[in-house]
Each structure stands twice: as C-alpha cells, then as structure tokens.
C-alpha cells in the first residue's frame, strides 16, 4: 500500500486552474521528486498532500487514511520554501519549540534535537540566533525543524535553495540515510543533478504530470542523454497534445 496516494487533484486560485486532475502514488522508503519550472504547480501539490491546503476536488490518502487529519499530519515532516523560524531564538531553542509542539520533552527532546542538528550539519552553530545565520544555514535549520519528531514521511519544497554544493551533497546523503531506515521523501526541485538522485520523478508542467518514472527510464523513453533533454522532450510532446509514449501513469494524471 502506498504511504501517500493523491487522486484526481484539482486546484484553482480564482479563475486560474493550477492543478488539473493530477494523480500520484508514493511508495514507502522511496525518494520521489517533483521536477518542473517555477509556476508548474509543484508547491501547490505538496501543500495539498501535506494537508496544508485543501484542493477544489480529488482526494489524498496518507497511510491509507483520508487527509487532512491531525494524527496523520503528525506522522509527516513538512519543509516549506520560505523558512518558518523564530529569528530571535537560537537553533537549539527553535528545535526545542517545534519539538514541544509534537509532544517531545525531557530526554526524548534532547536526543531528537541532537539528531536533527547532526542531520542538518548544524552541531557547532546550535547556540547562534537564527537571525545571525546565513540564508543557507537558515535553510538547514528549517530542515532540522521538519525532522525533529522523526517523521515517517518528509515533504520538502526546494529544500536546498541557498545551499552551497558541498552542503547540498551532505543533505542528499542524509536523505539516503533516512530512506535506508524506511523513511519516505517527497522533494520538489528544478535542479537536474538533484533530480538524478531521486528514485522516481514526476515531471510537471502547467499543472499536470507529463512523465513519471525513474531518471533512467525517463531518459531512455525520451532517447535523451540528460534529464534536461528528457524534460524538454516530454514538454514538447505535451504542448503538441500527444502523451509521451510509455507514460501511462502520466497520461492518466
């Protein structure tokens, strides 16, 4: 059974339809990436599966149960594009605050804080106020707050924005360690080398999925050497009204 199921999701803002009946299953222990340009609908989609936003129509199931539901949302970690931090608090204090919201306390909270700081590579910066952090460090602290309660599913919207290449590699290595422990990640990105690190990709354009598969499958079906060329292939097919061959799941979406 998928840990996340989205079926026929439609979302509109005013008269603009930003998601057009998209569907996706997310398997336990995988990293699935949503790859597409700005404005394609990535953030809207992850907001819906995280329970932050309610769609106009369609349904989302988490762990086999209908969303949104607070007990299900507590089993997820969510990292938005904009950092939700208290700038007057230190990294340690931010983590303790968010951990307490999830019911952590005492030794459990201390252990969770240490683990989250290690995963985000912020151990030596824990006593600095968040306002004194660089943009990249705030991004890593936002990731740590999403990890504080050891969620089963992590939903990450452009998690590496503002990070230098070395820290991006560190973060992705952390992601792999999480999936090795059975955690599931949904990651939005427009960066091709990050997309290559995902187990599967859903390529999204103008509010609908144009292709779905592993990076190797997507390149092979497109006859492309790179993911960028593969994306352009599927985008041109989509613009011409012809579904990409072999992409039955994307066609249904």
Image: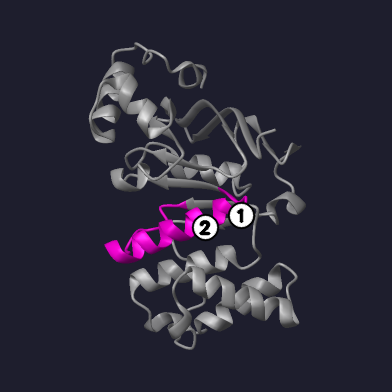
As drawn, is 141 to the left or to the right of 116?
Answer: left
Is residue 85 something one can see in this rendering? no
Does dot 1 land on a helix, a strand or a loop? loop
Coordinates of residue 4 in the picture (x, y in percent): 63, 38
Q: Position of residue 181 (x, y in %)?
A: 61, 54
Q: Are marks 2 and 1 in contact (CB under 8 Å)?
A: yes
Q: Is residue 248 left or right of residue 168?
A: right
Label 2 – label 1 distance at C-alpha: 7 Å
- Is 77 one of the magenta-colored residues? no
- In the image, the segment drawn in magenta is 157-184
Question: Looking at the image, is 121 positioned above or below residue 43?
Answer: below
Q: Position of residue 111 (x, y in %)?
A: 65, 77
Q: In front: 188, or 174?
A: 174
Q: How many marks?
A: 2
For residue 181, the mark is 1
Q: Residue at x 52, y 77 (%)?
A: 86
Image quadrant where residue 29 sits: top right
Quarter of the image where one finds residue 114: bottom right
User: Horizontal placement of 99 versus 196: left or right?
Assistant: right
Question: Is 19 located above or below residue 111 in the figure?
Answer: above
Circle on res. 177: 2
Residue 54's spot in the image, x, y percent? 62, 41
Who is closer to the viewer here, 124 or 66? 124
Dividing the picture into quadrants, the one containing residue 34 is: top left
Label 2 residue SS: helix
Question: Which quarter shows the N terminus?
Answer: top right
- Residue drawn at x 46%, y 39% as measured from the top left: 199
């Amino acid at each position: 059974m998928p840990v996340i199921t989205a079926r026929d999701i439609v979302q509109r803002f005013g008269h603009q339809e930003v998601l057009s009946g998209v569907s996706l299953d997310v398997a336990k222990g995988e990293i699935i990436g949503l790859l597409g340009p700005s404005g394609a609908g990535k953030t809207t989609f992850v907001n819906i599966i995280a329970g932050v936003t309610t769609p106009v129509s369609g349904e989302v199931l988490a762990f086999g149960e209908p969303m949104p539901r607070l007990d299900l949302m507590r089993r997820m970690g969510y990292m938005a594009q904009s950092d939700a931090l208290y700038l007057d608090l230190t990294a340690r204090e931010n983590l303790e605050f968010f951990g307490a919201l999830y019911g952590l306390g005492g030794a459990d909270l201390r252990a969770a804080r240490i683990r989250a700081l290690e995963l985000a590579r912020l151990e030596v910066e824990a006593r600095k106020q968040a306002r004194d952090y660089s943009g990249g460090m705030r991004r890593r602290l936002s990731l740590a707050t999403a990890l504080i309660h050891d969620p089963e599913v992590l939903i990450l919207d452009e998690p590496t924005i503002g990070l230098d290449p070395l820290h991006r590699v560190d973060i992705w290595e952390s992601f792999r360690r999480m999936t090795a422990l059975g955690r599931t990640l949904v990651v939005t990105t427009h960066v091709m080398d990050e997309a290559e690190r995902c187990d599967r990709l859903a390529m999204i354009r103008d509010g609908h999925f144009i292709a779905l598969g592993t990076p190797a499958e997507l390149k092979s079906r497109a006859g492309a050497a790179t993911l960028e060329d593969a994306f352009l292939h599927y985008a041109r097919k989509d613009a011409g009204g012809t579904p990409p061959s072999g992409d039955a799941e994307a066609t249904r979406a």
